[in-house]
Structure formats: C-alpha cells, structure tokens
Image: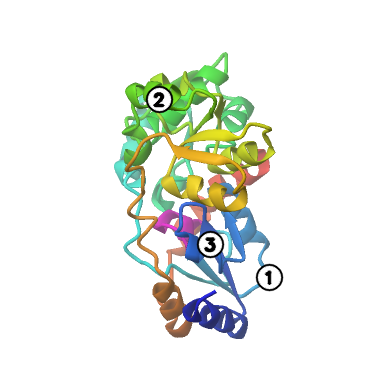
Amino acid sequence: MNEIQENILKLKAEKDALILAHYYQPLDIQEIADHVCDSFEMARRAQEADENLLVVCGVHFMAESAKILNRSKTVLLPSIDAGCPMADMVNPEAVVKLRQKYPQAAVVCYVNTSAAVKAVSDVCCTSSSADTIVRAMPEKQIIFLPDRNLGAYVSSKVMGKEIMLYDGYCPIHDRITETDARAAKAAHPEAKLLIHPECREEVLQYADYIGSTAGIIKEALSSTAKEFVIGTETAIAERLKKLAPEKDFYHLRAGTTCPNMKKTRLIDIYNSLSSGRYEIELEEDLMNAAEKSLQRMIELG
C-alpha cells in the first residue's frame, strides 16, 4: 500500500466515512474501498451504511442513488465529471412521451439513469435483477430503457410480455462484435466465454455464461475451468487475475475501458475527504419521486 492510500484510510477513519467503489474502478482505488460492488450492491450498501459520510467512487448516477437512499448523510463524488454516456441518452421528457404513447405500460429503467429519469419511472433494475423485476411487474406491456441490448436479453428470458426497447446503449459493451466473439473462441478454444448482457444479441449467442459484473466474477471464481474470456469492462479481467492468479483471463476485445470509470484517481478521493468536495445535492421533490423506483428495485430485485 502506498503513501496516498494510507493517508486516505486515515482520513476515512477520522471523518467516519464509507468508501464505495464500483468494479470498474482502477485497482488501486478498489484496494482502499470498504466495498467493491456493482450498481445494485452499491445501492444496498449505501442504504445500510452506519457512517455519516459516503464517498462514491463511480459515476454520477451512482452517487445520486446513494444520496436518494440516504437523505441525512453527506454523499461525495470525488470526480464530479464522471458521467455515463448511456444515462445521458434518455431524459424525463422522452419517458413522459413514451408513457403517453403506451398508457398501459410500466416503465422499467436501468439503474444507469439520472435521478430525473428514475423519478418518472415505475421501477429501476440492474443487469442482475432486470429479468426478475420485469417478470414480477403485473403489467403486460413494459417500456424498458435506456439499454436496448439489456432489454433484448430480458425480452428473450421473459415470456408473455410485450417489451418496448429504447434505443440507448453502453458504448463500451455495444462496440463488441460477433467477429470479436468468434475470434476469441478461436484463439482460446478451451476458455469459457463470460459476457455482460449489455452486449449485443449476436455476441451473447457465443457466451457460456451471461451475467452482471458481480455474476461474472462469481462464475469465474467458482468454475473448475482454468481459462476465461471476459466480455465486459477491462477492470473485471484485471480484478480476476488478482483474485485467481492460478487461472488465465483474456479480454474479449481490446479497448473495452470505460473512460468515465477511470476518471477517479486516488488524489481525487483524498481531496474529496479532506475538503468535502464534490457533494451531491438534489431537490427534495426529485428525491421523493426517484426513491420510489429505487426502493421498488430493492424490494423486487
């Protein structure tokens, strides 16, 4: 552990802070986090936290969710410009128009959305809970947004529902192609191919396992296989190499690094803890509306 990591841990103890880091964060940040998790687990950990100060090492929508679920606590986002391109692809006005077009439909929004979009949705979901939540909804029509790839995967898993897909996507996962999947299979014929459902349908057909980031990690660690091709953000393969050095992990495609997830640096966390920047503040009415969809996600997912 280096000096700045040690200084962060000292400040964390002094400030009664909890550090939450997403799996896609750099490894040196994961090393000083109290919890390293996916979006759903991050929401749960934030809600259960006893600490008065929450430091979210991730992107903006994650910090918003932590604040919505913890009104009395201070939530800090060390890198304020860490956004999510997929979340930016949908706004509340678009959701309202879809509701008008499909008045009998329920709106299921991926957790990768702004608080404003969550506020006009019926329930949130994550990649690990999406099919469970859609299946549990009483409505026969579902508007699923913003990720068309995750929505298509859910549609293939849930029968008896009409699912309308919004035309959004994760730029990192969507760029993985069928050609990439075939090439990976050819290069590593003994490897298990583990793929995130934010990838395209034609890529998922080559998968030995499809699941969330947490699911991919669990599958790789529990499997008796010794080789794996990882079809998601590059940090997952790097984390797995550290957790299971006796196994071999390969990237499905080069260049699947999320630049927004890599914006947070150790110095940003140190500065955030020492100065209180950047605090997430939201309008009370917005939080009240958005909380309903988040709480329903936690109940159903």
Q: Disc 2 versus disc 1: distance between alpha carbons?
A: 44 Å
- For disc 2, the marked residue is 181
From which residue to which does the magenta span run? Answer: 57-66
Q: Amino acid at mark 1?
A: Asp
Left or right: residue 158 compared with residue 238? right
Characterize the local packing of mark 3: few (<14), some (14-19) or many (20 or more) Cα atoms within 10 angstroms.
Answer: many
Image location (x, y in percent) of residue 48: 68, 61
Q: Quadrant of the N terminus?
A: bottom right
Q: Disc 3 versus disc 1: distance between alpha carbons?
A: 20 Å
Characterize the local packing of mark 1: few (<14), some (14-19) or many (20 or more) Cα atoms within 10 angstroms.
Answer: few
Q: Amino acid at mark 3?
A: Gln
Q: Residue at x 35, y 25 (%)?
A: 101
Callout in the foreground (3, 1): 3
In primary-sequence order, the first of circles 2 and 1 is 1
Q: Quadrant of the C terminus?
A: top right
Q: Is residue 301 visible?
A: no
Image location (x, y in percent) of residue 96: 36, 37
Left or right: residue 132 compared with residue 3? right
Return the mark for residue 30: 3
* SS class, disc 3: helix
Q: Are marks 2 and 1 in contact (CB under 8 Å)?
A: no
Q: Is residue 65 magenta?
A: yes
Return the mark for residue 50: 1
Q: Are marks 3 and 1 in contact (CB under 8 Å)?
A: no
Return the mark for residue 116: none
Callout in the foreground (2, 3): 2
Q: Residue at x 49, y 45 (%)?
A: 237
* SS class, disc 2: helix
